Amino acid sequence: MTSTLSRRWIQKLPFYVVLVGLCMVVMMPFFWMLLSSLKTNQQLFSLPVRWWVWPLHFDNYTHALSLIPFWAQLRNTVMLSGLTVLGNVLSGSFVAYGLSKVDWAGRRFLFGVLIATMLLPGVVTFVPTYLIFRNLGWLNTYLPLIVPTFLGSPYYIFLFRQFFLTIPESVSEAARVDGASELRIFTNVIVPLSGPAFSAVAVLSFVQAWTEYIGPLIYLNVPSQWTLSLGLSAFLNRYSAEWNLMMAAAVVFTVPLVVIFFIGNKYFMRGISFNTDIG
Amino acid sequence: MHHTELGRVAVQSRPASTFLTLKQRKNLWGILFVSPWIVGLVGLVLYPMALSLYYSFTNYDVVGSYQFIGLGNYQQMLVDPTFRQSLYNTLYLVVFMVPVSLVASLAYALLLNLPLFGQRLFRTLLYLPQMVPTVAGALLWMWIFNPEYGLINTVLGWFHIVGPLWLNSISWSKPSIVLMNLWGTGGAAIIFLAGLRGVSPSLIEAAKIDGANLWQRFWHITLPALSPLLLFNAVMGILSAMQYFTQAFVMGGGDSGGSVGLGNSLEFAMVYLYQVAFQDMRMGYASAMGWVLFLIMLILISILLVASSKWVYYEGWKRS
């Protein structure tokens, strides 16, 4: 008995070695980022590279945050990400209901269109969309970044639809028998049953909005409106030799997403693996 | 059946519905629910596409009046050295980054699917790079790639290897991008991992009994079962490689205009399109470039789809 157990262990050992090694390699850049953010600039640019320093220079963080208008940019980013989540969750679930639970004539055709737009590259629409928003007088406002999310993003509509299809038809049919309208079935029956789908879309679209770069770059030209992505890249242009400060700013920018990831881990995994049904 | 009959009676007995049949009511509800997306589809996809096609035949530059110049923009692309360079750079990513990332993410998924203790932790750690905001990641890797004080060349130094200049070298800057992207390969791995859960264990067990070794089991059972996802990830990979932007723009200093990366080596198609549109304000030319890039993507993906009928295996797979 013990001999077969240990034989199994020996068979598995190489895989453990590979996985642990891989994780260490993948974690190295994180360690490098933290370490660099706690060194003085002089320590950064001296050889041999030091893998530990004392004292740790936490003042890099306060210094970095005072150089970029960090709190204003954090507020802008949080506001933009929050509204993006709201827009995607509302429009995504609403539209998905019409594409999965209402049995109507255009459903199949429009689902095909949805898949096609999921694959449609933004490279064609990106310039004219800018011109349209420009004509509307929406430059240097958050509207071009927020309004589209309330009109539904194909990917999130798709995720909601895939989830709604797993809810048995008999559940909504029972409500229909009781005379409930489709709107009521959506708000009172389907939405309460779809917590995991809402969480998955919320975390995925929050991360997307938090890291978004090209949209804010095009539409927001006033520094007071900037998000952290824009602030950080401007920081690079102005203080390009101060890697300790840049790494400190990068850490502060990254930490909220890592926290969200550890809290909502299972929703990420679920959200990403929903789309395996696409076939 | 019984329930639907009852439902029909209940619905039809309501006064508001006397004008509409059940079918018409359903259609109205359907239209109501999809209407926000239809507005977006027309206003933010179809109309912009038509507008873009129209502008691609003009010399529109936002400020002045503009003329039709026929195929002028398209002819310009043929002789524009920066456009040719950007196309070469972009196809480099398609040819190298996409296959390398596919193989790596497949390998990740196979490792993470083994019945080992602690897989949840491994999976979480390997996915973590996806959580680093794009710009923060670009800054981090610029510092990692620093030839003298950076992480990579320091580690290479332990093995007495003198590392290359990475981003400061025309020939190494694109491989640097491929390497950096490999760090975030955990995302595609999760998709493969979900697919691996669907591979029937009894089939694997049967093959084991028949004496198939690990490689044979992978090649004849696991890989065919994963082939639809391989196709999906390949299509997604091509789309994102063809539109590669943020990291190159930040690391190559696209903000300042002019060369992106040393000797334009990081001037990818999307970066050049951005510069033409928003730094030079040549909207007509940028629109034409958008259509040419779109066409190239369509061709690449069509080739992939046609070829896939030979290797993608759909049996037992839900097709929606």
Image (cartoon, rainbow, N blue to C red):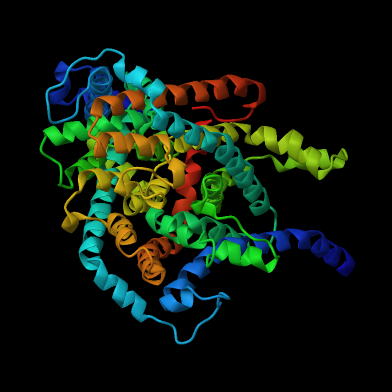
Point out the residue furthest to the top here. Answer: B70
Judge whether A65 appears above or below B170 on screen.
below
**Could you say which quadrant of the image residue A231 lies in?**
bottom left
Judge whether A128 appears above or below B216 on screen.
above
Q: How many marks?
A: 0
> Residue B8: in sight, yes or no?
yes
Judge whether A32 appears above or below B270 on screen.
below
Q: Give percent across and percent down for residue B18.
A: 15, 19
Q: Residue at x 46, y 24 (%)?
A: B296
Judge whether B179 appears above or below B285 on screen.
below
Dividing the image into 4 quarters, which one contains the N terminus of chain B? top left
> Residue A168: in sight, yes or no?
no
Q: Residue at x 50, y 61 (%)?
A: B146
**Image-based side of A53 in relation to A255, left or right:** right
Q: Give percent across and percent down for residue A251.
A: 40, 67
**Could you say which quadrant of the image residue A214 lies in?**
top left
Which of the two residues, B263 or A169, is positioned nearer the viewer here?
B263
Q: Give percent across and percent down for residue B295.
A: 42, 21
Which of the two residues, B47 or B30, is positioned nearer the viewer here?
B47
Point out the residue furthest to the bottom here. Answer: A55
Which of the two residues, B178 or A198, is positioned nearer the viewer here?
B178
**Image-based side of A10 in relation to B130, left or right:** right
Q: Give percent across and percent down for residue A25.
A: 61, 62
Which of the two residues, A38 or B201, is positioned nearer the viewer here?
A38
**Could you say which quadrant of the image residue A242 lies in?**
bottom left
